[in-house]
Image (tube, rainbow, N blue to C red):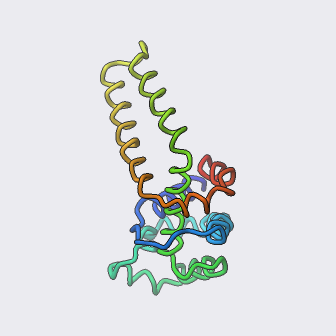
Amino acid sequence: MARVVKVLAGLMLLFSVQLHAADLNKVQVGQWLASYQAVQQWTKQHQDELLALDAQSFFDDDQAASDITNNPLYQDMLRVLASHGFNSAAHWSQVGEQIMLAYGASQQATIKQDFSKEIADIRNDPNMTAEQKEAMLSLLETTQQLTEQFASVTEADKQAVADYVDQITKLAGQ
């Protein structure tokens, strides 16, 4: 079950189309965090049905996803999201992505320090083969490149998540 929730959340956050969105506000952040718990419960209740579907198409905002919008499961999910103030799955996903980017930007100094330490640890690890080191360093480099997106985060978005850092950290660690 936890795997399904993580996969679904990851799909929603990582593969959603980032829209040119307005700045976040604290109300949106609070709504999204509250809705995340509801989405987890909904996902648990419908995990078998979700595995049988292309669940990512729930969160796409293009015409190719139009077939899925007639699915009763999709309509049920929209009711859950609407009860938390979101008018579509794509909107919910976009706000979640914006929150996670703002959170990452607010944690950027720590992340850079962690990357530097991890890179040094890998390079100096006598128990890793050259191939293992290369693979790990490549993964870290890719992840580090993703953090470059933090530069585009607005101050308003960072301020909107500031009061929720502990909750987001807990959520990110699940």
At horizontal 44% and vertical 70% (from top left) the residue drawn is 53
As drawn, is 136 to the left or to the right of 34? left
Where on the picture, by quarter, is residue 29? bottom right
Q: How many marks overall?
A: 0
Where on the picture, by quarter, is residue 158? bottom right
Residue at the farthest bottom position? 70
Quadrant for the N terminus in the image: bottom right
Looking at the picture, how far across and down is residue 88, in whole percent? 51, 80
Looking at the picture, how far across and down is residue 113, in whole percent? 50, 32
At horizontal 41% and vertical 57% (from top left) the residue drawn is 152
Looking at the picture, how far across and down is residue 28, in whole percent? 62, 71
Towards the viewer: 52 or 172: 172
Residue at the farthest front position? 155
Looking at the picture, how far across and down is residue 46, in whole percent? 59, 69
As drawn, is 38 to the left or to the right of 150? right
* Residue 170 visible, this angle: yes
At horizontal 43% and vertical 16% (from top left) the residue drawn is 125
At horizontal 49% and vertical 62% (from top left) the residue drawn is 97
Image height of 17 relative to 109, above or below: below
Where on the picture, by quarter, is residue 17? bottom left
